[in-house]
Image: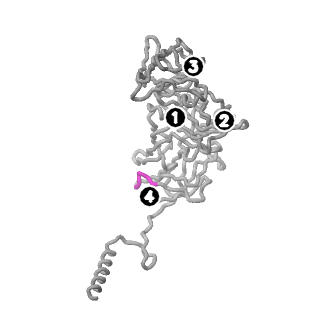
Amino acid sequence: MKKFYLFGSLAFLLGLVLQACVDPVEQTEVGKEETVAPKTMEFHATLEEGDGTKTAMDGLDVVWSEGDTIKIFSAQYPAGKNFMLKRGDGGNVSGTFVGSDLGPGPYYAVYPAFVADSFNETDGTLSGFFPQSQTYAEDSFGRGANISWGTAMTQKDLRFHNVGGVIAFCLKGTATIVEVNLYTMAGNGKEFLNGSMQIDSSTGTIVQGGDVRNENSRKLTLDCRAGGGVELNQGDGVTFYISTPAGVLGDGFFVEFVDSEGMAMIKSAKGGGANVINRSKIRRMPAFTYTPQYNADFLLESDDFAAYGGVTTKAAVNCCLYTQGESQYAYMTYDRYDERLARFQDWNKGYSVALNILPIAMTMNATPKVTVTALGETGPIVSKSSASMKIIKLTAYHAWLYDARADQGYVIKMAEED
């Protein structure tokens, strides 16, 4: 019994020693422990307003949504911390955001939180990115698409300002739209629509954008697939809103509308001040009726070279697909003859297609003369001389040519110097 009692006493003493070594805790009830909660902060945040009754975005409702998150930076936390909107504050221009302690101000904030990376207090710039994809929302832009930036000295006066603007397209018809793709015109080398960015905290403007040499940085996508797509009507139509950086599209743009049946329509606009996207404003394009023009697979082709038959039908066929690592291609220009050559081939599959294009210059909606030399298993693609084709799509390093007489299309790669 003594041995048993002595063991129990030793265990009790060890327990006291171990308890003295652990981190301090808050005692709530006898025998129960609870760790001390971290200090929290609350910020009162207001979105940009116009005339007092409408937001500055041309009357379009711009309010906080339930679940919204902003990222706030301070000198003590240059990597920033996320703050979430208090439940019940959704649907209002002003709201309270809650998060952990940031220390003293000034404070710098961005909405939505996921686009922000870090803040450089030395030069006052925020590093982050402008997303390529947005989600359709009825009568508005998608959640998180309207990037906003704010500063404050205290927790009570955090005011946000829109970084970019919006372009709006109104479509009428009977189709169901599942995707909208917006592109800047190729060859300008000045505009970016998505990618890495830096925001000047003193002006709220993007001072450095993504790599314009990257073809994908000149495109924005509006995903409309939720619920099976957006059904058009023949009355007032449906408006699609796409948020963009401010100052873009002045050099021209084109847009693709893709429907649920695998067809698409493409519209283009020339450059000019009338198309520039201004900060905190909506650029509304004239309404038009959706009419399917081309097979969506052809318009959205991502390979460097391809040749399609039946381009204006749902049954379009990719006759000669370039396969990375298996096929070969060559492209060059002959300044002396004002001629462009594009050739791709695959000896394993047994075909070769060469295009001689005059003139060299590639511009949207131009109609160059194209000589096609087809060898081997090319299906409906056959040799022809000086066929008139139209450039229906043009990105930084690729062109889509359409032969209306044969209902065939070609995707070619161009040199970077183009």
Classify the position of the C terminus by image quarter: top left
Q: Residues within 10 Å of mark 2 (few under 14, many from 20)?
A: many
Q: Nearer the viewer, mark 2 or mark 1?
A: 2
Do the residues bearing badges 2 and 3 touch, measured as CB atoms within 8 Å?
no
Mark in the foreground, 3 or 1: 3
Q: Earlier in the sequence, mark 2 or mark 1?
A: 2
Q: Amino acid at mark 3?
A: Asp
Between 245 and 259, the one lying in front of the other is: 259
Residue type, mark 1 in image: Lys
- Report, in whole angstroms, how far the alpha carbon at label 4 lies from the one at label 2: 50 Å
- Disc nearer the start of the sequence (1/4): 4
Q: Which residue is mark 1?
A: 219
Mark closer to the chain start, 4 or 2: 4
Q: Which residue is mark 2?
A: 175
Image marks 4 and 3: residues in contact by CB distance under 8 Å: no
The earlier-in-sequence mark between 2 and 3 is: 2
Task: Tell me the distance, in whole angstroms, between the alpha carbons under discs 4 and 3.
Answer: 61 Å
Q: Residues within 10 Å of mark 3 (few under 14, many from 20)?
A: some
- Amino acid type at image mark 2: Ala
Q: Can you give x and y, in whole percent of width and height, for residue 97 in the image?
A: 53, 57
The residue at which mark 3 appears reads as: 403
Q: State which quarter of the image contains the N terminus.
A: bottom left
For the residue pair 54 and 225, the one nearer the viewer reads as: 225
Cα–Cα gap, marks 2 and 3: 25 Å
Q: Secondary structure at mark 1?
A: strand
Judging by the rendered image, the residue that carries numbered circle 4 is 102
Question: What's the residue type where badge 4 is placed?
Answer: Leu
Classify mark 4: helix, strand or loop: loop
Real-space CA distance between mark 3 and mark 1, rounded to the nearest whole angstrom: 25 Å
Of tags 4 and 2, which is closer to the observer? 2
Instruction: Tell me whether the residue at label 4 lies in contact with that at label 2, contact meaning CB atoms closer than 8 angstroms.
Output: no
Instruction: Report the span colored magenta.
Output: 76-81
